[in-house]
Amino acid sequence: MNIYSLLTPIILLIIMTLILIVFTLICILLILPILLIFWRRMYTKERTNRKQKGTVVGFFHPYCNAGGGGEKVLWAMIKAVQSKYPNIHIVVYTGDLDADPEQILNKSQKSFNIKIQSNIEFIYLHKRKWVEANMYPYFTLLGQSLGSIWLGIEALNNLVPDIYIDTMGYAFTYPLFKYIGGCKVGSYTHYPTISTDMLRHVYRRVISHNNRRIIARNPFLSAGKIVYYRLFALLYGFAGRTADIVMVNSSWTEEHINSIWKCPLRTHRIYPPTDVQHLTSLPLYDDTKEDDQIRIVSVAQFRPEKNHPLMLRTMYELRSIVKEEIWDKICLVLIGSCRDAEDKVRVKDMQDLSKHFALDENVEFKLNIPYSELVSELQKASIGLHAMWNEHFGISVVECMAAGLIMVAHASGGPRADIIETQPGSQTGFLAEEAEEYAKILAYIINMHPEDKKTIRLAARASVNRFSNELFEKEVLRTMEPLFRQKQE
């Protein structure tokens, strides 16, 4: 047997493989455009035959009843659209199957003090589980993104809007609604699905909630994850660029979106709404009075990235550096909403951790409280605490500052870039990273002279007017006006 007879099967295999690849590419190039044209015509026909006449605006927010900062943006945006365009039909795509429309609207008013007109339609989505992280133990970002397309198809099949506005950051739904649904697409991004900071964490092999220990400690797995992240970033950028209007909530988010989506001329920074007018009118905390308690308040949903364990470790460190009589007065109040059973488990874990640190007498948990009770808690507190790394903006940080609290937040993301000034003479709060640093700052604030505290409180209050509800509504309507003008013409 000569060498040619050995090579012949290999050559034939290579030729057949090439033919198969070429045939597949031809099928994709021919069949995919035909399918896109067919689907586009099908959804155009559904839009023509729908019962809602006139302009329909669809807000895509599968967790609209969660009660967090993202939901506050949703309802404030809807309120703004209702006020300027009262005849437009508004639809909210939601996966909150356990709540009827009246319950959802009541919660928006109870949690955020936002009154929504009742002429709003809710489209209930049954495939929300496909965008949840626990469905994808591996390749979570890609799995959730593909799941959002599946969820978007369900939304599109239920009702085809004229204007599609995503307020949760599901960028992979934009090409679906634009090229197949024929919609104008607007987005409000709170947090980029992937960022250069995430890539940096993997490159440096830093352990975090999105970079597990087994990957961080293995150079080969870390290298593989970097390749995966870079490829995902390319897809994410392509999807994001298909939006007609891009809104972001902070300069930190804007920087990352511009670096990945590469459409700066269509990107607008609009800070989230905060009820600063009401909160700044509250009586300022009196540092000269002798209180029974020194209340430290944290307002954050019970999600992993909010880093409640860091706050408890801070309290543990604080106990060792303040006098016992001072420690007996200190109380950390953790206020937040729970979206589901997993969040409730996290709360139970935090309660167990506080007992493990022997902090249970100095920590309170307040879940899903109404806005009126939140305001009451802010009035009773003197210090605010926030621990999330790379918080995209920080509505609760602004709320605490507006209410007159001295804020201590993580030295990253929105709090550092947009909200808190630490320079002497114009200081509005403090920034920290590790538990020991947080604890030292808290001890420093507790021991500060009352006049120095008052100076920071007044400076913080004076700095938050740029985050008002009124300014948010004005900027949102200005930015989205081209979408409505094109549809109404």
Image: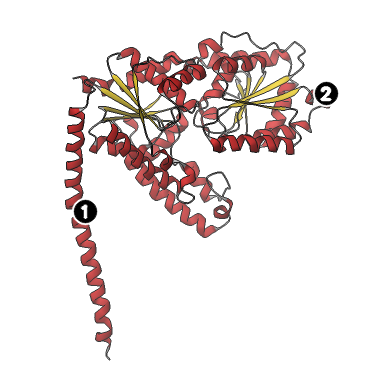
Q: Quadrant of residue 271?
A: top left
Q: Quadrant of residue 253?
A: top left
Q: Secondary structure under badge 2?
A: helix
How far is disc 1 from disc 2 in space, using C-alphas?
Answer: 73 Å
The quarter in which the C terminus is drawn is: top left
Task: Say the numbered circle drawn on residue 405.
Answer: none
Residue sitting at x 58%, y 21%? 369
Q: Quadrant of residue 100?
A: top left
Instruction: Answer few, some or many: residues within 10 Å of disc 1's Cα (few below 14, many 20 plus, some between 14 and 19).
Output: few
Residue sitting at x 30%, y 24%? 57
Q: In x, y percent, where is residue 456? A: 63, 17
Going by the numbered disc 2, the residue's amino acid type is Glu
Instruction: Answer few, some or many: residues within 10 Å of disc 2's Cα (few below 14, many 20 plus, some between 14 and 19).
Output: few
Q: In x, y percent, where is residue 285? A: 67, 12
* Residue 307 visible, this angle: no
Asked whether, in this view, residue 436 is left or right of residue 46, the answer is right
Asked whether, in this view, residue 47 is left or right of residue 227, the answer is left
User: In this view, which residue lies farthest toward the right?
Assistant: 324
Q: Which residue is mark 1?
A: 28
Asked if residue 356 is positioned above or below residue 404 in the image, the reply reads below
Asked whether, in this view, residue 61 is left or right of residue 318, the answer is left
Please state which of residues 391 and 441 is positioned toward the viewer in this rendering.
391
* Residue 347 visible, this angle: yes
Going by the numbered disc 1, the residue's amino acid type is Ile
Q: In x, y percent, where is residue 290? A: 77, 13
- Callout 1 touching callout 2 (CB < 8 Å): no
Q: Which residue is mark 2?
A: 325
